[in-house]
Amino acid sequence: MSDQLAYRPEQALRVFPIGRTTMFAKIKSGEIESFTVGRARFIPRKALVDFMQRQIADQNHAAG
């Protein structure tokens, strides 16, 4: 599954296990970018990587 371009939210939870409620809150707030096709929502793999990198940068900045 790692070479998919985008994941459905439930699929994203298997590769980025942050908790279902947290995932949907981050999507709703825009912290994790997503898009829809019809009624289906997708999260680009890059959006998960970008979110992770922002989290790491924020933690490193707070610690430094």
Image (spheres, rainbow, N blue to C red):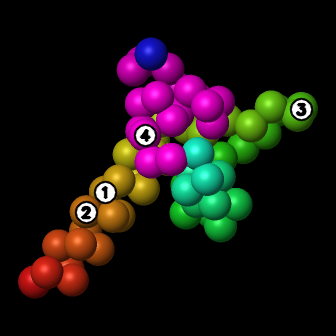
Q: Residues within 10 Å of mark 3 (few under 14, many from 20)?
A: few
Judge by depth and name the residue closer to the eye, 3 or 25: 25
Is residue 14 one of those drawn in magenta? yes
Q: Is 39 drawn above or below residue 52 in the view shown? A: above
Gap between marks 4 and 2, in whole Å?
A: 16 Å
Instruction: Tell me where the magenta segment starts and ends, as one range.
Output: 2-19
SS at badge 3: loop
Q: Which residue is mark 1?
A: 53
Q: Looking at the picture, which amino acid does disc 2 mark?
A: Ile
- Residue drawn 35% across the image and 64% down it: 54
Label 4 secondary element: loop
Amino acid bearing label 4: Pro
**Disc 2 to disc 3, how far (Cα)?**
33 Å
Q: Are marks 2 and 1 in contact (CB under 8 Å)?
A: yes
Q: CA distance from mark 3 to mark 4?
A: 26 Å
User: Of tags 3 and 4, which is closer to the observer?
Assistant: 4
Residue on which disc 3 sits: 38
The image quarter containing residue 37 is top right
Camera-nearest label, 1 or 4: 4
Query: Quick check: is 13 in the magenta stretch?
Result: yes
Image position of 63 (left or right of 49): left
Residue 21 higher or lower than 12, as above or below:
below
What is the C-alpha distance between the residues marked 3 and 1? 30 Å
Mark 4 — residue? Answer: 17
In the image, taking residue 41 as reference, residue 63 lies left or right, namely left
Dot in front, 2 or 3: 2
Residue 56's tag is: 2
The quarter of the picture where residue 1 lies is top left
Which of the two discs, 2 and 3, labels the residue nearer the N terminus? 3
x, y percent for residue 9: 63, 36
Quadrant of the rendered image containing residue 8: top right
